[in-house]
Image (cartoon, grey):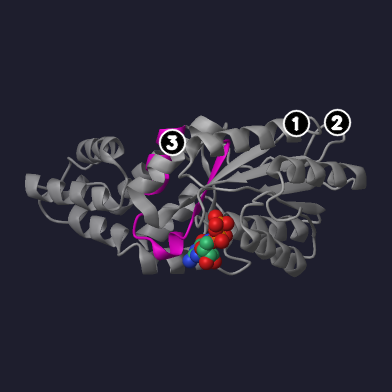
Amino acid sequence: LVRLRERLSRSQGGLGRGLLALLSRDRLDEDTWESIEDTLLTADIGVGPTQELVDNLRSRLRVQGGDAPDPRAVLREELVKLVGPDLDRRLQVTGTDGNPGVVLVVGVNGAGKTTTVGKIARILVAQDHTVTLGAADTFRAAAVDQLATWGERVGVDVVRGPEGSDPASVAFEAVKTAAAQGVDTVLVDTAGRLQNKAGLMDELGKVKRVIEKQAPVTEVLLVLDATTGQNGLIQARVFSEIVDVTGIVLTKLDGSAKGGIVVQVQRELGVPVKLVGLGEGADDLAPFDPGAFVDALLG
Ligand code: GDP
């Protein structure tokens, strides 16, 4: 939590502080509300949610003088409400009927998939889960090597095929091996060449279908780079057409002033942000907690 606060307050360019300064003015005139709107839009909260938030703030902060509510408390409450305090953000990492849990990790190249797989593995191992990694991004030898390095680092098995082998068969093999060994969770890293949408659609669809001959996929995590703003949203839409995304991992929140993207992407896809990436290190992944997130924004 301390790290979340440090990393976010460094990168969010004082979104929360800016809003608080505006809301604490003696008179909340139209110019002030416009500045508040601009500040929210700059943080990528999106037009609809910004309007909603400003409407709520306006009606709740109308009272001025002695009985005026504390703007900080009101802002905190409204931001938390916007982020969705009641969404179920637990990862489905355990399978049923003796099957391993299968987590498919998707997203464009460079979003942080492989790193996220490594970090999730580390968290699960720390919780005494057994884990196998499947290197189904067979198109890029470097991606397979990178995953293998994470496997060594975290101390879990990595199932890989020769370069250029069929991603679905590698994924199948990973789940089969894990099932035979009684492993709790398989994390499957996939390819993300968005240039060829039809090809990617075929590939990811097949990976999922073939895995499910062995065991149900329990979670499909879409990894999105928070620094890519609206582009990230477009990618999110494409991936959600290809596979049924069940959760979002927002990476590089440490380097982004666009934390508001959390709100937009959840609305866009109708699925919760479950994890956030806060750096390149092995421990820089945290469950997403709306209250802690808003507190970090408010500094
Ligand atoms: P992939 O192509 O989607 O598998 O992406 P990678 O896992 O290879 O990550 C791409 C780059 O982003 C690497 O240099 C990672 O170290 C970096 N990265 C991943 N997650 C984060 C994060 O949360 N914060 C920061 N600052 N960098 C990250």
Residue 44 in view, yes or no: yes
Note whether 177 is above or below 255 in the view shown.
Answer: above
The answer to whether 118 appears left or right of 80 in the picture is right
Q: Residue 188 carries which label?
A: none
Which of the two labelled residues, at mark 1 and mark 2, occupies the earlier sequence position? 2
Q: Which residue is drawn at 37% across and 66% down?
A: 11
Q: Residue 237 carries which label?
A: 3
Instruction: State the residue position of label 2.
Output: 97
| Residue 296 placement (x, y as % from top left) | 42, 60
Instruction: State the residue position of label 1.
Output: 212
Residue 278 in view, yes or no: no
| Residue 62 lies in the magenta stretch | no
Asked which secondary structure carries label 3, the reply is helix
Give how far apart the Cα atoms at labels 1 and 2 are.
13 Å
Residue labelled 3 has its Cβ within 8 Å of some atom of ligand 1: no
| Residue 249 lies in the magenta stretch | yes
Asked which secondary structure carries label 2, the reply is loop
The answer to whether 31 appears left or right of 38 in the picture is left
Which of the two labelled residues, at mark 2 and mark 3, occupies the earlier sequence position? 2
In the rendered structure, are the residues bearing label 1 and label 2 in contact, judged by CB atoms less than 8 Å apart?
Answer: no
Residue in front for this viewpoint, 228 or 120: 228
* Magenta stretch, residue numbers: 245-269
The quarter of the rendered structure image containing the C terminus is bottom left
Q: Which amino acid does label 1 sit on?
A: Glu
Tally of numbered discs: 3
Which of the two labelled residues, at mark 3 and mark 1, occupies the earlier sequence position? 1
